[in-house]
Amino acid sequence: MSQKLEVIKQNVIECTKCDLCQTRTNAVPGKGNFHSDVIFVGEAPGRNEDVRGEPFVGVAGKKLSFALEEAGISRDDVYITNIVKCRPPKNRVPTVMERDTCKNYLNEEIAIIKPKLICILGNTAFNSLLGGSEITKFRGKLVRKDNQFYFLTVHPAATIYNQELIEVLKGDIKKLFELITELKNGNEIKVDIEYSS
């Protein structure tokens, strides 16, 4: 399994499928525990990620690590990735074309890891994976689509500009791991939104 993820990682690092390859310093493949019950999916790498070639290593990453620690989870226990694997210039939102071009990498990561839950961080990931918008309205909710569970929360970067959201993120991450525990114990969990494909 880890070999398959290694192949994806190499493919991401060498990728030249869209124009972002011309402006990036490093492509940023997903990283973490491939036995994880959850995959966290953000928008795209930022400046620190672009320099280091790793996801969520900047300020937003620290906020995510903090929320995980508050829930008693080590960052090493989870898998973290993004919709788009290269930093868009000036941290702009990735275009639909860029997201579509990058989609296969994420689909492959999900297929290999087979997480119980995919945690969607913020609007771009919400839109890309489920066609949704207004994450603040739907955060904290559990979604099911094609027999895959998704959990919605704010992007950790949003907590940098809005301090109140750090409590929201912490609460959501706690709830996320409670849901994972229920799923692992074989219990029924209440789905808030059902998508038919």
Image (cartoon, grey):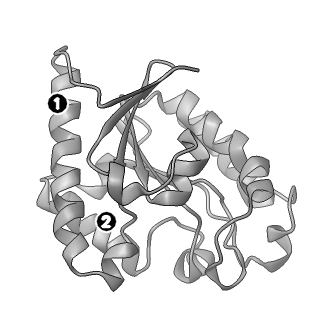
The quadrant of the image that shows the N terminus is: top right
Q: Is residue 88 left or right of residue 148?
A: right
The residue that mark 2 highlights is 64
182 up-or-down from 71: above or below: above
User: Where does label 1 land, which residue?
Assistant: 181
Q: Quadrant of residue 184?
A: top left
Q: Which kind of residue does numbered mark 1 sit on?
A: Thr
Q: Amino acid at mark 2?
A: Leu
Disc 2: CA contacts within 10 A as few (<14), some (14-19) or many (>=20) = many
> Which residue is drawn at the image coordinates 22% and 58% (left, top)?
68
Q: Nearer the viewer, residue 7 or 168?
A: 168
Query: Element at badge 2?
Result: helix
Local SS, label 1? helix
Picture coordinates of residue 29, whole percent (x, y): 61, 56
Where residue 71 sits: x, y (%)?
Answer: 14, 54
- The x and y percentages for residue 48 are 53, 81
Asked whether residue 158 is in view, the answer is yes
Decide: is 111 above or below 132: above
